[in-house]
Amino acid sequence: MDRGLFTGVLFLDLKKAFDTVDHSILLAKLEKYGIQGKSLEWFKSYLKDRKQVCSINGKKSSANDINCGVPQGSNVGPILFLLYINDLPNSLKMSKPSMFADDTNLTCVGQSSSEIETKLNEELENVHRWLTANKLTLNDEKTEFMLIGSRSRIACVHNSPVLKLGHRHIKRVYYKKSLVNAFKRRLDKTA
């Protein structure tokens, strides 16, 4: 803002992020990170032969095999998810990511709101391609963006940036709570 620039922040929301992690892709990524031999076999056995039962009003379904997803109530599940999405930043060209669990924000800077629009739309496409390759889905109804700048610069914006994924418009917000920022503030207080 001191340099008279705009900042665009894209708040990504993934549909059922922990539940849709593809086991074969995850295991391939673990192997690329250097997890091999007995350690990799342990992860395979951890993910394999999991079952799921649905209970509604006391009636239970039969057990079904689970071929994707990581357990959310475990210590290992969130770590596996982070390893799964760890290479998302490699798909980005014009923004800086901030990631905390399944909460990801992309930030870019520009001279004008139209430059922010162009950059964030391109990054949205890059993220979409990465998500498709990794069998994850963006929740476009909960994905939002914010335009940040000085009051005088924001007052001069007559046409709000338009962000779209396919034919779906991404909603502009003026206030947003973010796990990424809350986590960073907590770390700053403890340092």
Image: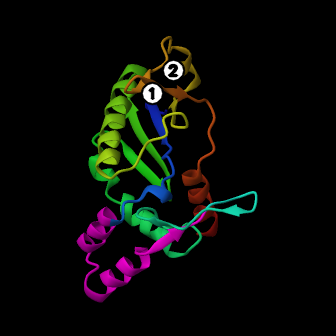
Element marked by disc 1? loop
The image quarter in which residue 31 lies: bottom left
How many numbered badges does the structure rendering display? 2
Report x, y in % for residue 28: 26, 68
Q: Which residue is mark 2?
A: 153
Q: Which residue is mark 1?
A: 4
Crowdedness near tag 1: few (<14), some (14–19) or many (≥20) residues, C-alpha within 10 Å: few
Residue toward you, 30 or 156: 30
| Quadrant into which the C terminus falls | bottom right
Q: Which residues fall within the magenta stretch? A: 24-53
Q: Amino acid at mark 1?
A: Gly
Element marked by disc 2? helix
The image quarter in which residue 39 lies: bottom left
Task: Identify the residue at horizontal 35%, vertical 47% (top origin).
Answer: 131
The image quarter in which residue 129 lies: top left
Residue toward you, 89 or 6: 89
Residue 45 seen anywhere in this rendered image of the structure: yes
Q: Are marks 2 and 1 in contact (CB under 8 Å)?
A: yes
Above or below — where is 110 with respect to 11? above
Residue toward you, 163 or 98: 163
- What secondary structure is the magenta-colored segment mainly? helix
Task: Identify the residue at horizontal 36%, vertical 65% (top origin).
Answer: 23
Residue at far bottom of view:
38
How far apart are the alpha carbons under marks 2 and 1?
7 Å
Crowdedness near tag 2: few (<14), some (14–19) or many (≥20) residues, C-alpha within 10 Å: some
Report x, y in % for residue 176: 62, 39
Residue at far top of view:
158
Task: Identify the residue at horizontal 43%, vertical 29% (top origin).
Answer: 5
Residue 34 falls within the magenta-colored stretch: yes
